[in-house]
Image (cartoon, helix red, strand yellow):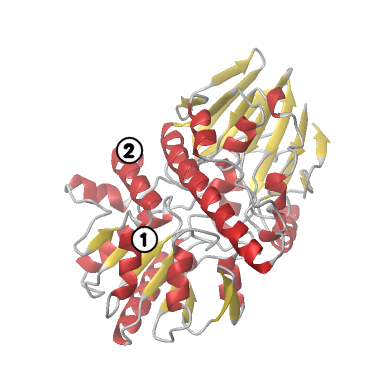
Amino acid sequence: MKIKFLGATKNVTGSKFYIQADGKNILIDCGLFQERELKNRNWGKFPIPPENIDYILLTHAHLDHSGYLPKIVKDGFSGKILCSLPTLEITKVALLDSAKLQVEDAEKKKKRHEKEGKKGPYPEIPLYDVEDVMNVFDLFQPVSYNKEVNLSKDIKVIFYKSGHILGSSFIKIITEGKEIVFSGDIGRKESPILPNPDILESADILIMETTYGDRIHEKREIAEEKLVDIINETNKKRGNIVIPTFAIERAQEILYYLKKLLLEDKIPHLLTFLDSPMAIEITEIFKKYLSYLDGEAEKLLKNKISPFDFPLLHLTKTVEESKMINHIKGSVIIMAGSGMCTGGRIKHHLIKNIEREESSILFVGYQAKGTLGREILEKHNVRILGNFYNVRARIEKIDGFSGHADRDELLEWIYGFKKQPENIFLVHGEENVINTFSEILRERYSKSKIIIPSYLDVFEL
C-alpha cells in the first residue's frame, strides 16, 4: 500500500491524497490550490494519470477540497466520486460558481495583460468552464454516515461526521489489515448549527489537518461581543460593515448570529445584503437538510423559526443589484464572497470601502498565506483588480466564528483514539504551524511516527 501527497503539504489548500491498495487507485479529495504562489500547480500536468484513478472520496465541498474535480474529469477521470448527500449538492453549486469565476477572471486577466503588455504567471484561459462541471455530476455517488462501502474485496470505506460544514466527513479506509483515517477539516464542538465531530477510536495511519494547530480560538461569547461592537461603532460613523464570507457554512452561521443579535436587540436593524448567488443557493440547501443541523439552530427550527432569515435581509442575485448597494447612504452590512477575497463580488465592495476610515472590513474565516484577505490583514497598501489601495478602513478578524477546530480542539479529537496510530501525517497547515503542532504531538505520542510530508512525497505503508 502506498500514499502519495499531491497537495495541502506545508500549505493549507489543494487537498489531494493518492492511495494505491488492493489493485485500486483512490484519490481522497480533489482540491484547488488557492495560494498565489501555488496556483500554477492547478494548470500543470496532474502527477497521476487521471484515467488510472478508480475512485475519488470527498471529505467536503470547499473548493480547496473539491474544486479540481472538473479539471481531472476533463483530463480523463471517469470513476466514481463518493461523498455525503449534502456534500454532493453543495459541491455542484460550488463548482458551477467556480467555473463562472474561472471564465470571468481569465477574460479580465487577458484584457488587463493586453493593456499592460505582459503575460501572467499562469495561462489567461479558464481552468474549466460550466460544460466541464456538468460532466462531473453523473460520477457522484452519495453515501451515508457510519455505513461500510465496499470498493473492492479488500477495501472498505466509512464516512463519519466531522462537524466542519454541512455534510462534511472524516473518511476511514480499511484495507490490508490497516485502518487509514483522513481527517479532512475537523469542525468545532458546540457549533450553533452543526453537530459535534464524531470521535473515532482507532486508526493505524492518520492523515490529520493542522490549520489552527498553533492557536486557541476566542470563545463564541467573546466573538459575539466583538461582532456587536464592530456593527454598532461602524453604524455610529455611518460606514459600512463589509464581511468577506465563505458561501458554504460561514455565510449561514453569520446569518444565524445576526438573527440572534437582532432578536436580543443588541444591534441596530440595518439593511443587510447577502451579495453572493452561491451563498443564497447554499442557504436553500441548508433549509433542505435541516435534519443534518444541530445545536441552537435546532431549537429555533422546533419553534418554526428560520435560523437564516430576518427583516431587512436582501438576497442580491444579479450584478445590477450588487452595484446598487454602493449607492445607499448610511450604514449597511455587506456579506459577499469569496471568503479569502480571491475572487467574486467582494473585491468591488472592498474597492468602495477599503479607503473609507468610517467603514469596517471584518474577516470571520481563515485567510491563507498569499491571498488578498491575508494581505489586507497584514499590509497598509494592497492590490485589488490591478490597482493599489491604501488600507484606511477598520480591519478586524474574529476567530470565534471559525469552522475549524483550534489547537486544543484538534488535540481533544486525536486524544479520543484509544491507541496511538503507527503513523501520523500532518497536513493542511502553514509550515510553521505544522512544526509547532508536531512538537506538541511528539510529547504525547512517543510511539507514533509523526511525519510532515512535502509535495509529491510517496510513502510505503
Rendered location of residue 123, percent (x, y): 68, 51
Please name whichever residue, 23 or 122, is drawn nearer the observer in this view of the structure.
Answer: 122
| C-alpha separation, residue under disc 1 versus residue under disc 2 | 18 Å
How far across and how far down the image is residue 190, in percent?
A: 41, 53
What residue is shown at x 46% (from left), y 72% (from top)?
350
Question: Residue at coordinates 66% horizontally, 68% vertically from top-left?
Answer: 116
Amino acid at circle 2: Tyr
Residue 455 lies, with reference to residue 318, above or below; the image says above
Vertical placement of 59 versus 194: above or below? above
What is the crowding at mark 2: few (fewer than 14 residues within 10 Å), some, or many (at least 20)?
few
Name the residue at 76% across, 43% down: 448
Quadrant where the C terminus sits is top right
Residue 20 left/right relative to 198: right
Which amino acid type is shown beneath numbered disc 1?
Ile
Residue at numbered disc 2: 289
Residue 259, by quadrant, is bottom left
Label 1 belongs to which residue? 254
Count residues near mark 1 (Cα–Cα under 10 Å), then give few for <14, some for 14-19, many for 20+: some
Q: How many labels were placed on the picture? A: 2
